[in-house]
Image (spheres, rainbow, N blue to C red):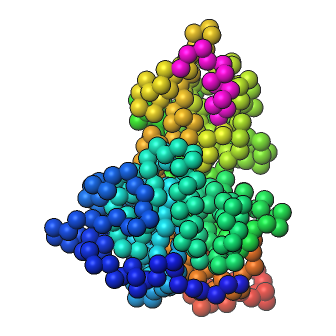
Amino acid sequence: MAERRPAAGSRGAAGSRGAAGSRLTAGSRAAGAAPVQGPRSDVADQGLAAAGLARIGWAERAMPALGLIRAHFEAEQPFAGLAVAACLHVTAETAGLVNVLRAGGAQVHLAASNPLSTQDDVAAALAACQGATVSARSGADRKTYYEHIHSALDCAPALVIDDGCDLVNTLHAERQELLAGVLGGCESTTTGVARLRRMAAAGTLGFPMVAANASETRRMLDNRYGTGQSAIDGIIRATNTLLAGKVVVVAGFGSAGTGIAERARGLGARVIVTEVDPVRALDAVMQGFHVLPMAAAAPVGEIFITATGSRGVIAAGHLAVMRDGVILANAGHFDVEIDVRGLAGLAVAVHPQVRPHADEYVLADGRRLILLAEGRIVNLVAAEGHPAAVMDLSFAAQALVLAWLARDHAGLPPGVHDVPAAIDAQIASLMLASLGTEIDALTPAQRDYLDSWRYGS
C-alpha cells in the first residue's frame, strides 16, 4: 500500500497565500476582505461567496456532531499533507464536511455529483477558502460534469469520497496512473456501493473503499428518515399537491423506500409498494402496505416515486397505461429509474417547467404525465436534500472513516469494507448527545454475563 505523500500544491504553499480572503471559513471572514478564488476552482459566480457563507453557517449550526469532530481534527491533524478528491452534492451541508476535513489538514478538491443539486453560492464560498478547490456549476452539462471530476482528480488524491461511484469509476477507467497513490475512500450511496461491489468482484477495484451507506446508523437516519422526508418535500414543493387521499406508488422497499412509504402514509396517502425482493415485499405487507407488481400499479397510481438504485423500474409500457395527471418522481441517485427517453417517445408535446422542476408530457390521447426534476433525484433538485441534522450524522461518519483510513490503510486489502462497528457506535453516541439523550451502560456483571458461555438460565 502506498505511503502518505504531500498533496499537490503542498500545505505550505496553500498556507502562504497572502490574501486575507484565502482564509475564509463558514464562521469567520476578515473584515473588508475580498474573496479569493482557488487557482483551479470553476464556479459560476465568485460574487456569491458572501451569501454562500451565510448559508453554510446556518447549516453548520444544525450539525453539532461535525463540530465536535472538527475540534478533534484541528488538534490531531489526521490529514496533514494529504489531498482528498470528493464528488458530492455541493450543498451547504457538504460544505460542513469540507470544512472539517480542511480543519484536519486536508487539501480538498470538490466536484459536483449532480449539477442540478449544486448551490452556486456554496460553491463560491468554498472556492474562497484556503485548502479547497471547487469545480461545480449548477446546470452543468455532461461534458462539463466529467471535466470537473477530472479536475478533482488532478490533485493526485490520497483519499477519495464518492457519491454514486462516478469519481472512482473515472479514476479506474481513465486515470489509472493515480491508483497507486490512493490509500482508500468511502462511498455514500446504495447505487455507488453496488457498483463498487461489482468492481471488486471483477478484481478491478484498486484500493479499499468503505461502504458508508451500509452502516446501521446511515440506513436508519439518512436513508429512512432523511430520504423519507426530503423526497416528499421535493414533490410537494414542485407540485403543491395534496397527498391525503392520493394513491402513491413507491418502487423499492429498502430503507429509503420504507421511509418514503411511511411519510406518504402519514400524510394520508394510500400507499402501494412494488418490489423484486420477496423478503422486503413481505416486510411491506406486514407493515400494512399494499404490494403489487409495477404493471398492476401503473394504471391506478397517482404519484410514483422510485427508490431502487436500478434502471427501467418505470418503463415505457408502464407509462403508456398511467392515468391523466400522474406525477413521476425519482428518489434514487441516478436518472435511470424512470424511462425518460421512453416517456419522450410516447409524448406528442412537452411543456417544460409548467412549474419549477416540473415538465408536462402530453400523450396522443391527451393524457398528461408530469415528470419532476428531469427524472433526477427529486429531493436535491426540487428541494434542499436532507435536513442538516441528518447530514450531520452522514458526514460525521465519512469524516471519521477517512481519518481511520489515513491511519490504518496498510492493513486493508483492496475491496469494499463495512464501516467499523466502533465508528458506527461513536456516531450514534454523538447524535444522542446532540439530542440531549442519555442511555444506560452495562455493569461489569452484565458484561461478564454477556461475554461468557458458562452462565445458564
Q: Is residue 391 visible?
A: no
* Residue at 62% over, 52% down: 255
Foreground residue among 193 and 274: 193
Q: Quadrant of residue 211?
A: bottom right
Residue lying furthest left:
32
Q: Is residue 153 visible?
A: yes
* Residue at 66% over, 29% down: 341
Q: Is residue 408 above or below residue 270?
A: below
Foreground residue among 146 and 158: 146
Q: What is the x, y in percent for residue 369?
A: 56, 21
Q: What is the x, y in percent for residue 14?
A: 39, 79
Q: Is residue 343 left or right of residue 416?
A: left
Position of the C terminus, as image quadrant, is bottom right
Residue lying furthest right:
202
In magenta segment, residue 348 = yes
Q: Is residue 165 above or below residue 97?
A: above
Q: Quadrant of residue 187?
A: bottom right
Magenta-colored span: 338-350
Q: Total of numbered circles in the picture?
A: 0
Q: Is residue 113 left or right of residue 179?
A: left
Q: Quadrant of residue 26?
A: bottom left
Residue lying furthest top:
365
Q: Is residue 194 above or below residue 244?
A: below
* Residue at 71% over, 68% down: 176
Position of the N terminus, as image quadrant, is bottom right
Q: What is the x, y in percent for residue 257?
A: 62, 45
* Residue at 77% over, 46% down: 277
Q: What is the x, y in percent for residue 73?
A: 44, 82
In magenta segment, residue 27 = no
